[in-house]
Image (tube, helix red, strand yellow):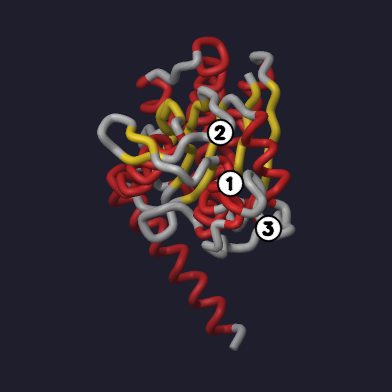
Amino acid sequence: MNILVVNASPRGKKGNTYVLQEAFVRGALSSGAQVKEVFLKSQKIKPCLGCMMCWIKTPGKCIQKDDQAELLEKCVWADLLVLVTPVYVDGMTAQAKTFFDRLIPLGHPEFILEGDHCRHPPLHPKNWKFLLMSNCGFHEMDNFDALIMHCQRICTNFRCDYLGHLLRPHGPLMGLPEIFGEAIGRVTQAAERAAEEIVRTGLLSESAMTDVSAEIVPRDVYIQMVNSYWSAEKGKAASEG
């Protein structure tokens, strides 16, 4: 299985979502998959111009000369696309949205009807699979709902098989291994196991998704921790003038 992991966090490897990504990649490699990782923060990708030249003048290729051209080739190579993004304002990051907007060269401009719905025929027909990996600063799981729905709709348009999601609520705790090392270890082991499942069977189990999202601390404790942290940060900023 060829796996393309697209990290859309502005913080890259310093982000909390990367802890899940690192474990997932480890599990995928140990299971024999070929993995390519891309960090959008290091890529030069311009916003889509909406000119449609990739459908008319240069079919399959954007007229803009930037790093997205190589990413399109990687998408065609991949069997599984893994989107790694924190939740920003109830959705994916701006980097992730720009990446998806610039995937339209992978389709034809004409319409066809599929399931009584207009779609664009794919330029490179293949049975893609898709996995969402995300973390959120809030404690409740429903903060991922809008992001999940968006990704599912993207999968419908791009004819991807949506395998599921590895979601980490109260994600900032993933950056505190000195305090929550045991709990973090259970989460990363679940992410690693999820990769092994996908490579071996092409599927993702409910138990793997549930284990990645397991509560680390109760909500009231987490709220106290977060507020204490920001109070301290504000105090330091005030003292520094």
- Give percent across and percent down for residue 2: 65, 24
Q: Quadrant of residue 236?
A: bottom right
For label 2, the SS is strand
Q: Earlier in the sequence, mark 3 or mark 1?
A: 3
Q: Earlier in the sequence, mark 1 or mark 2?
A: 2
For label 2, count other residues whose C-alpha is less than 10 Å away and answer few (under 14), some (14-19) or many (20+): many
Q: CA distance from mark 1 to mark 2?
A: 17 Å
For label 3, the SS is loop
The residue pinned by badge 1 equals: 105
Which mark, by number, is residue 81? 2
Q: CA distance from mark 2 to mark 3?
A: 24 Å
Q: Nearer the viewer, mark 1 or mark 2?
A: 1
- Which residue does the image show at 63% across and 18% down from the upper left? 1
- Which residue does the image show at 46% across and 30% down from the upper left? 160
The residue pinned by badge 3 equals: 63
For label 1, the SS is helix
Q: Is residue 36 above or below residue 59?
A: above
- Which residue does the image show at 50% across and 56% down from the upper left? 93
| Residues under numbered marks 1 and 2 in contact, where contact means CB atoms less than 8 Å apart | no
Q: Is residue 32 above or below residue 82?
A: above
